Image (cartoon, helix red, strand yellow):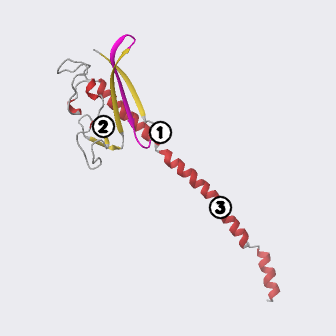
Amino acid sequence: MSRGDFGRRAQAQGGYSLIEVVAAIVVLGLVFSGFASVYGTVLQQGAQPQLGSQALTVADAYLSEITSRAYRDPDSGALCGGGEAARPLFDDVCDYDGLAQNGCTATSAACPALGDCACGRDGQPLAGLNAFRVAVGVTPATLSGVNGLDVQVRVSHDGLAADGVLLQSFRAED
């Protein structure tokens, strides 16, 4: 085989030049970098619906607990009198005003500091609810001429947009 035959055979096989290969790599790199930026955004926002649903469930549980309590303090009969020392002892709606540390009275391995997790009625942390913050406000209010208490429960989390979830209820005297 002569040298001329080898050159004609290589041209007939139709390989890619170095410039074509480099151009293809650059184009593929641009396409994949676009996918990567979109994928990163989707991953960041993908947890938000689940966190919002959990925050709503937590807020509903706290609100149900609060509104199930007595309107007036059973100990003194006063409206928004002296508060109880800890959440397991809360016996009227006003005891929850300004709830501190999510109402936690204990810690756990999953929630090593008071208030790291949402807590149950007993003051024990709920391990699956790390980083949720609960804020409760109870204020006297009048609705359609009826005196009562405006109860607001806000549950937030760093992964939630804005201020999280706010549930509000009106509790009138029995």
Foreground tag (3 vs 2): 2
Q: Nearer the viewer, residue 100 or 74?
A: 100
Q: Which residue matches tag 2? A: 102
Q: Residue 4: give x, y in percent of width and height.
A: 82, 86
Q: Residue at coordinates 25% horizontally, 40% vertically from top-left?
A: 124
Q: Earlier in the sequence, mark 1 or mark 3?
A: 3
Q: Nearer the viewer, residue 19 or 135?
A: 135
Q: Per the image, is 145 magenta?
A: yes
Horizontal relation, residue 159 to residue 94: left or right:
right
Q: CA distance from mark 3 to mark 2?
A: 50 Å
Horizontal relation, residue 67 to residue 84: left or right:
right
Q: In the rendered structure, which amino acid carries the disc numbered 3? A: Leu
Q: Earlier in the sequence, mark 3 or mark 2?
A: 3
Classify 40 as above or below 60. below
Whether tag 3 and tag 2 are in contact, CB under 8 A, the answer is no
Q: Residues within 10 Å of mark 1 (few under 14, many from 20)?
A: few
Q: Main secondary structure of the magenta part?
A: strand
Give the quarter of the image for residue 67: top left
Q: Residue at coordinates 32% horizontally, 25% vertically from top-left?
A: 138
Q: CA distance from mark 1 to mark 3?
A: 34 Å
Q: Per the image, is 103 magenta?
A: no
**Residue 161 image label:** 1
Q: In the rendered structure, which amino acid carries the disc numbered 1? A: Ala
Horizontal relation, residue 121 to residue 159: left or right:
left
Q: Give the residues drawn in magenta, as a range.
A: 143-159
Name the outermost residue toward the top: 145
